[in-house]
């Protein structure tokens, strides 16, 4: 790693040029080819997917996305008022001409007579697309919205619902990214002592990686199915980890420079130490993200690949582009005050720096000494706090939030409210009963099922069955009495599948499947809930083996794995308490409560496990460095000193990195509900991880465990590969150089702590 850093530092023009050339080339190719975002969603071996397949092959006019145009009469008018009818009929005629729409059932036709509420103030038209919802573009959905809203007037309010409509309502992530960038820059300025250029470098590296990554993802969308939401998640994840990676490397570089190393040596040290931490953490995130392929859910494939590309590129810029940029900066990586201190010849000594010793002073050393002195109390108290935060996970309910949780100004939220008022909340999540019939007896059995279902608890109404053009499939719609995200709706689907349908099909060749968006979401949650434990076990085992090879220890990776699981548990517990139970929802300006979206725990676990690994490796590697340097013959005292000094050194950087993560992920709260859940879960867990777990619990446990932290059986040590994080620090250059800085002349010799000289015509490393 140090050789790579030196090469990038010395050949900085080539490195920067190659990155810019690659970015321009990929952007050009992406602009020329465009993107093909769509994202296929399939759940093999599920009942809802069987319904989709049945309708696609036999009933194509009913297999596409189904949206609703909701009509609400106002000012005392009714749906059948002449003025309302004229305006709405004209708008629905325009809707029927929207490209991609194959059919529309108006409430003013015989087939749509049941689509008018009992009081006559609310009605809806059923719109069917030729494609599934994930293939309907935002542009087509906007065309539908614009056509329908031409009926909006003083007498009638038009709103729309459906998956395609929801997708088109999602705000651009631009504002969220802007908030995150500004927040990150503020913290970087604070941690770097006002060094503006050094503070901009992590943002520059992350920004270039994400611009390049977005173009790569756009090109990749032609080869595989990727939804547009994948790019939003990739940008936000890449921004968070990319800035942190840059912070780790530049912080170590600045410390080395202030300790008297030459610029090239400082860059080599930063990449050989913090760069290895970045590499290990980034690879862990990528492996965890790509491990989502094991779940067998096509929707997650594009998300995982996109996020992995973003993380991989931010990791690559951190260990190659940043050393090259540091080569251009020279002393400007330090603030003016820091450069003045270097010019005065005063040695940089701080409790968090290279010379931190038990005699040091400062907040971080005091914090570390307090943990050492009260290790039992600190361990028990912090562990209890983390467990208490994670406890709501036992009530975790996965599912898909419905439109009631959308922002109040979204048309989907308004449509949900209108339908719930006119027909009941279940009309927002209809169930499709698709039956494959082969005889008259099958038809009779299906009609009997519909009659029984109409009188079943939890069912509001059932539509008459319609037959496919080829006569092989019959389709009916069941409207529950409860909302799509309600547990009662899940119970109704289970009752239909487990009892009513088997009873109706008994003794016949009838095959009945329950489809529709609501049923698909229920199956999605069920599939992920079943496979999540295996996914977690694989990632945890892999991380354990990596840490065991890195630290040559059994207990350190074991403790780290347990701590990472606690961190994930705290994230999911807090998410369930806020988004499902509603704790603090008003404070966070949430529109409503609902289950935690089923795909988020997988994503959060993938990203958070890598971030936790990042902080763990950075903390423990500094502790291990002090342990290896220690000379105390008493192992217990040597361990205490190593843990205390290592924590004091790593504390400010971990705190700054966590602060950046919290603010960046917290900016997700300005996005759609899924992004808000994702941002809150990650931001809150980083807070718990940095403050309670890495800041208190892990150091306290390492004090309690003692020298056994570093124990490894000899036979296992011979088998494990050596993946050292910390490299030996390069010594200052042995040669003597002369030069000027301003109007002052300097002579820099071996071991001298006078300022590093930056001479454009000749660098000390040349």
Image (cartoon, rainbow, N blue to C red):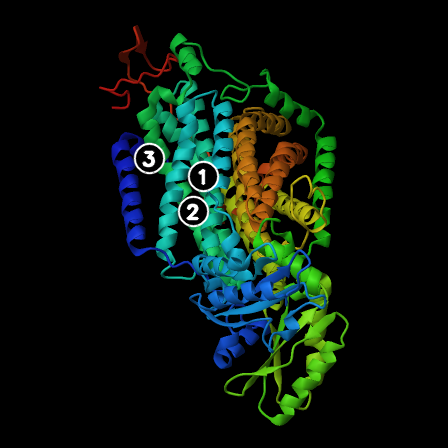
Q: Is residue 73 left or right of residue 225?
A: right
In the rendered image, which residue does mark 1 sit on?
242
**Is 659 in front, or is 285?**
659
**Disc marking residue 3:** 3
Relative to residue 98, is residue 370 depicted above or below?
above
Q: Secondary structure at mark 1?
A: helix
Q: CA distance from mark 1 to mark 3?
A: 22 Å
- How many numbered marks appear? 3
Residue, x 43% and y 32% (percent of image)?
Answer: 249
**Is 610 in front, or is 576?**
576
Residue, x 74% and y 81% (percent of image)?
Answer: 452
Looking at marks 2 and 1 on the same chain, the residue that comes earlier in the sequence is marked by 1
Residue 335 in view, yes or no:
yes
**Disc marking residue 310:** 2
Disc 2 packing (10 Å; few <14; some 14–19; many ≥20): many
Q: CA distance from mark 2 to mark 1?
A: 9 Å
Quarter holding the N terminus? Answer: top left
Between marks 2 and 3 in the image, the one whose residue lies nearer the viewer: 2
Residue, x 26% and y 32% (percent of image)?
Answer: 13
Between marks 1 and 3 in the image, the one whose residue lies nearer the viewer: 1
Residue, x 66% and y 90% (percent of image)?
Answer: 444
Q: Are marks 2 and 1 in contact (CB under 8 Å)?
A: yes
Name of the residue lying farthest toward the front: 82
Q: Is residue 622 left or right of residue 579?
A: left
Quarter holding the C terminus? Answer: top left
């Amino acid at each position: 790693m140090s050789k790579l850093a030196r090469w990038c530092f010395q050949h900085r023009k080539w490195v920067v040029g190659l990155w810019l050339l690659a970015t321009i080339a990929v952007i050009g190719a992406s602009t020329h080819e465009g993107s093909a975002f769509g994202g296929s969603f399939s759940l093999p071996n599920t009942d809802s997917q069987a319904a989709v397949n049945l309708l696609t092959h036999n009933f194509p006019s009913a297999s596409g996305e189904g949206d609703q145009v909701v009509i609400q009469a106002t000012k005392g008018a009714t749906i059948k008022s002449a003025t309302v009818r004229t305006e709405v009929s004209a708008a629905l005629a325009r809707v029927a001409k929207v490209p991609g729409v194959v059919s529309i059932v108006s409430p003013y036709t015989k087939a749509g007579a049941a689509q008018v509420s009992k009081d006559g103030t609310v009605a809806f038209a059923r719109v069917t697309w030729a494609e599934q919802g994930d293939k309907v573009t935002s542009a087509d959905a906007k065309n539908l919205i614009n056509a329908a809203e031409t009926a909006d007037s003083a007498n009638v309010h038009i709103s729309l619902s459906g998956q395609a409509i929801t997708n088109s309502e999602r705000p651009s992530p631009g504002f969220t990214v802007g908030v995150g960038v500004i927040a990150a820059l503020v913290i970087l300025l604070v941690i770097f002592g006002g060094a503006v250029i050094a503070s901009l470098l992590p943002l520059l590296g992350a920004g270039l990686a994400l611009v390049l990554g977005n173009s790569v993802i756009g090109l990749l969308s032609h080869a595989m199915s990727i939804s547009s939401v994948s790019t939003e998640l990739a940008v936000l994840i890449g921004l968070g980890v990319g800035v942190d990676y840059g912070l780790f490397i530049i912080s170590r570089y600045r410390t080395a420079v202030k300790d008297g190393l030459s610029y090239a040596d400082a860059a080599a040290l930063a990449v050989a130490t913090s760069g290895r931490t970045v590499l290990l953490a980034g690879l862990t995130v990528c492996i965890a993200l790509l491990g989502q392929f094991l779940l067998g859910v096509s929707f997650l494939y594009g998300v995982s690949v996109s996020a992995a590309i973003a993380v991989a590129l931010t990791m690559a810029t951190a260990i190659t582009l940043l050393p090259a940029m540091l080569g251009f900066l020279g002393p400007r990586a330090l603030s003016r005050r820091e450069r003045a201190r270097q010019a005065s010849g005063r040695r940089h000594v701080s409790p968090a720096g290279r010379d931190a010793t038990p005699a040091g002073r400062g907040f971080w050393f005091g914090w570390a000494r307090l943990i050492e002195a009260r290790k039992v109390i600190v361990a028990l108290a912090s562990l209890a706090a983390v467990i208490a935060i994670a406890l709501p996970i036992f009530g975790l309910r996965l599912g898909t939030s419905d439109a009631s949780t959308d922002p109040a100004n979204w048309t989907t939220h308004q449509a949900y409210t209108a339908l719930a008022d006119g027909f009941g909340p279940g009309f927002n999540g209809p169930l499709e009963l698709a039956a494959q019939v082969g005889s008259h007896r099958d038809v009779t059995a299906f009609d009997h099922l519909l009659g029984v279902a109409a009188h079943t608890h939890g069912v509001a109404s059932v539509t008459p069955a319609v037959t496919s053009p080829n006569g092989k499939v019959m389709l009916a719609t069941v409207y529950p009495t409860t909302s799509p995200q309600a547990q009662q709706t899940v119970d109704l689907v289970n009752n239909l599948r487990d009892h009513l349908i088997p009873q109706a099909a008994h003794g016949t060749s009838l095959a009945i499947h329950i489809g529709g968006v609501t049923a698909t979401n229920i199956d999605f949650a069920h599939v992920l809930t079943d496979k999540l434990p295996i996914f977690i076990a694989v990632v945890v085992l892999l991380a354990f083996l990596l840490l065991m090879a890195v630290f040559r220890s059994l207990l350190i990776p074991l403790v780290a794995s347990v701590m990472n699981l606690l961190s994930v548990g705290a994230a999911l517990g807090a998410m369930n308490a806020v988004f499902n139970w509603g704790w603090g929802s008003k404070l966070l300006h949430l529109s409503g409560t609902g289950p935690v979206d089923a795909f988020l725990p997988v994503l959060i676990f993938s990203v958070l496990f890598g971030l936790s690994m990042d902080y763990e490796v950075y903390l423990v590697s500094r502790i291990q460095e002090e342990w290896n340097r220690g000379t105390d013959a008493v192992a217990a005292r040597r361990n205490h000193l190593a843990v205390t000094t290592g924590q004091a050194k790593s504390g400010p950087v971990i705190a700054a990195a966590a602060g950046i993560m919290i603010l960046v992920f917290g900016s997700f709260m300005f996005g759609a509900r899924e992004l808000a859940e994702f941002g809150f879960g990650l931001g809150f867990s980083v807070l718990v991880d940095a403050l309670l777990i890495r800041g208190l619990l892990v150091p306290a446990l390492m004090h309690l465990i003692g020298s056994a932290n570093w124990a490894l059986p000899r036979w296992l040590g011979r088998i494990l590969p050596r993946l050292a994080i910390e490299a030996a620090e390069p010594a200052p250059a042995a040669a003597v150089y002369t030069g000027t800085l301003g109007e002052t002349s300097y002579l820099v010799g071996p071991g001298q702590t006078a300022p590093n000289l930056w001479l454009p015509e000749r660098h000390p490393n040349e």
